[in-house]
Image: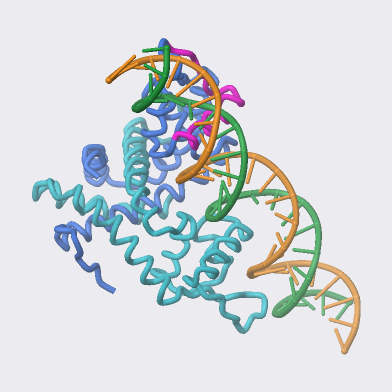
Chain colours: A cyan, B blue, C green, D orange
DNA sequence: TGATTTAGTTAGCATAGCTAACTATATTCT
DNA sequence: AGAATATAGTTAGCTATGCTAACTAAATCA
């Protein structure tokens, strides 16, 4: 029952930190996921919509890459979002490309869902002391850069 | 574009921290998820298997609850794991219940997959300085307790 | 013993992931 | 210019994963 090194050069210390972080992220999202069902919209659609709302309009291929999903998969996700009026496909100069844009309704729904999740988590943080809270903020701010290196 | 309070009493500061943490967790797992495909086993099966491997044998209902999934869903996930020989259903004293146990093969596969994910993340942490690393560890250790409060 | 509760399964529906194969538009090359 | 190639998306068809409703079987209770 040990972590055996193979082609990795990561130290045992780093592996341990990574393991804790990984496990915590899994359990965190597993809990929050429940709140998403209230939106009546599937997780893949919600996630794709959030890229459009927070990152702005983009093509289907770009969105697929951002979501680490194949184009056919994203094509169907977008069809679902379009059918319910959360996203619009617009033509571009390049006749092959589409520009995907979140509608006002899509933006509203996304914000509501995000608010639910974030509030659930914020309530869980309410019992933290001042020092812990500050440390937690630091961590949250370190992570985005780390993630880009994965 | 503001986070409007509704029935929540969370402060803007907590909401901001929660938002950053939430977003970081999503992006972290989205990246790591890619490595899982190498195992040739789906995410729900992998996650359920990990509960059995790290948490020990349990009933189907308990596993469903741990995974925050309905019993019929877990029933099918377990059928998949059983078909590929990663988990075994065993009878118990209570004739209604089953005891789900990870097989040796299941345990091995899970460890390999986990190792891949954790190594990916550990490599991304390799560029951190000593102080940052220490902070990251502290924070990763704060999270499990927070998660239980969600 | 008969009624109820509990554990799990089966059936049927929707979403979400993939690859392979297709269409349509752009670009490149002669 | 016209043919060949490359690129962007879609369609078709498979598997996996989520749900509810309805069922079976075992345990418990009155």
Q: Quadrant of residue B40?
A: top right
Q: Residue at x 62, y 75 (%)?
A: A97
Q: Which residue is more in the foreground, B107 or B85?
A: B85
| Residue A1 appears in the rendering | no
How many callouts does the rendering have? 0
Q: Which residue is drawn at 25% across and 52% down?
A: A120
Q: Is residue A54 left or right of residue B40?
A: left
- The N terminus of chain A appears in which quarter of the rendering? top left
Q: In the image, residue B59 lies at what x, y percent?
A: 41, 23
Q: Residue at x 41, y 33 (%)?
A: B64
| Residue A62 appears in the rendering | yes
- Asked if residue B33 is positioned above or below residue B5 in the image, the reply reads above
Q: In the image, residue C4 lies at what x, y percent?
A: 35, 27
Q: In the image, residue B118 lies at what x, y percent?
A: 42, 37
- Asked if residue D21 is positioned above or below residue B75 in the image, the reply reads below
Q: In the image, residue A6 lies at what x, y percent?
A: 50, 29
| Segment tinted magenta in the rendering | B71-92
Q: Quadrant of residue B141?
A: top left
Q: Which residue is more in the foreground, A107 or D1?
A: A107
Name the residue furthest left. A130
- Asked if residue B5 is positioned above or below residue D20 in the image, the reply reads below
Magenta stretch: includes residue A81: no
Q: In this view, does C16 lie to the left or right of D3?
A: left
Name the residue furthest top. B93
Q: Which residue is drawn at 56% across and 35% down?
A: B41
């Amino acid at each position: 029952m040990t972590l055996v090194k193979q082609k990795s050069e990561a130290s045992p210390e780093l592996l341990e930190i990574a393991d804790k972080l990984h496990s915590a992220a899994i359990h965190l999202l597993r809990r929050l996921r429940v709140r998403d069902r209230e939106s009546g919209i599937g997780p893949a659609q919600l996630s794709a919509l959030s890229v459009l709302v927070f990152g702005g309009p983009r093509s289907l291929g770009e969105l697929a890459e951002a979501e680490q999903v194949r184009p056919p998969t994203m094509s169907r996700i977008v069809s679902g979002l379009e059918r319910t009026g959360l996203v619009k496909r617009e033509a571009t100069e390049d006749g092959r490309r589409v520009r995907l844009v979140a509608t006002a309704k899509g933006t509203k729904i996304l914000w509501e869902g995000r608010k639910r999740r974030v509030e659930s988590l914020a309530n869980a943080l309410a019992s933290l002391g001042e020092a812990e809270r500050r440390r937690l903020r630091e961590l949250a701010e370190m992570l985005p850069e780390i993630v880009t290196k994965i």
